[in-house]
Image: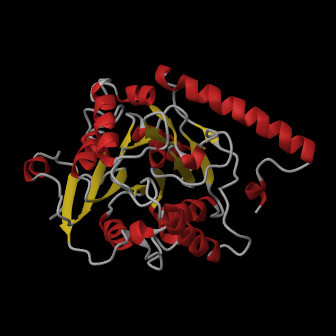
Amino acid sequence: MNLTPTPKVSVIVIGYKMPGQLENTLRSLYADYQRGVSEEDYEVIVMENSSVANLRESFVQNLPSNFRYLLREESAATPVYAVNEAFALCRAPLICLMIDGARMVSPGIIQNALMAYAITPGAIVAVPGYHLGNDEQHMVDGVEDQLAFEQQLLASVNWEADGYELFRISTFSGANRRGYLQPIMECNCIFASADNFAAIGFANTDFQLPGGGSINLHMYRSLGMLPGTRLFVTPGEGSFHQYHGGVTTSSYEEREAEIEKHRIQLHSYWPEGFHSLRREPTLIGEISPQSVSFLQDSLEFAQKRTKRLTNQGRPFWPDDTV
């Protein structure tokens, strides 16, 4: 079937055994929620690995016309095959990867990515990560208590009418716990050109650990280290993680052992050892009133880092020279 017109952005969302959270995420990608864009500007490719808890059929049937949904069978515990299948379906020159379907987003991510891409086709756009609640989710015990608390939080703000309200009930995620004006370890909502995703080989299928291990960290840094790219960060936008019992955001006694497996594999791909992407960010987009406090926190953390590195005679952004 000939689908026209060609979208400007393809958004990939991967889901598994998180129907309620995935619904919220997809709702935050509707055109009546996203600002400054129309349905014709972007497509959303939803890849759900089948489980005992899939999206409701009624919800899938009512997805907007710019959404494509595929329910797939997967025997492996990693999302990399679903990711690569989705890449093959993308029609736009600019792609957004959301490898965790439990990440709601703020209303300006697509229009900001398009602005960055208009500046340079080498744009890598990182949307900072947040966790719903006052603590990172692996710090909170009790699945039922956490889910109930999160539902109360979401009910306390009218996020569907104004997605920036999510900032009021969130905290920085561990990947950027000191804000976004210094190196970020990973990005769960990242935009790059289709050519640049191809240049890193898409999702490396060696990442077979549950949940893909650290595939997301590996892809983010790989994109950021490509020659001819420029890192953009959206200080007024966010990717908000919902609790769903994920591999690294759950609280269980084997968590540290599992993360150690992630570390070992990740470091094996980087001769000098893996570390956060240390490139100077170009800030793009508006600062919503709800996100101002996070900008202030980021500035305070950045001032401390600047002072420390200046005293040590170390470069601020060493990856910029590689």
Q: Residue at x 46, y 49 (%)?
A: 138
Q: Residue at x 47, y 65 (%)?
A: 254
Specify whether residue 174 is in view.
yes
Task: Tell whether 94 sits left or right of 259.
Answer: left
Specify whether residue 195 is in view.
no
Give the answer, above or below, for where 320 lies relative to 206. Answer: above
The one of 184 and 75 positioned closer to us in this rendering: 75
Residue 170 falls in image quadrant: top left
Give the answer, above or below, for where 316 lies relative to 212. Answer: above
Give the answer, above or below, for where 23 lies relative to 17. Answer: above
Task: Tell whether 189 sits left or right of 59.
Answer: right
The one of 301 and 40 positioned closer to us in this rendering: 301
The one of 219 and 53 positioned closer to us in this rendering: 53
Residue 162 point in image, percent of width and height: 33, 25
The one of 255 and 173 positioned closer to us in this rendering: 255
Q: Residue at x 55, y 59 (%)?
A: 220
Residue 280 point in image, percent of width and height: 70, 46
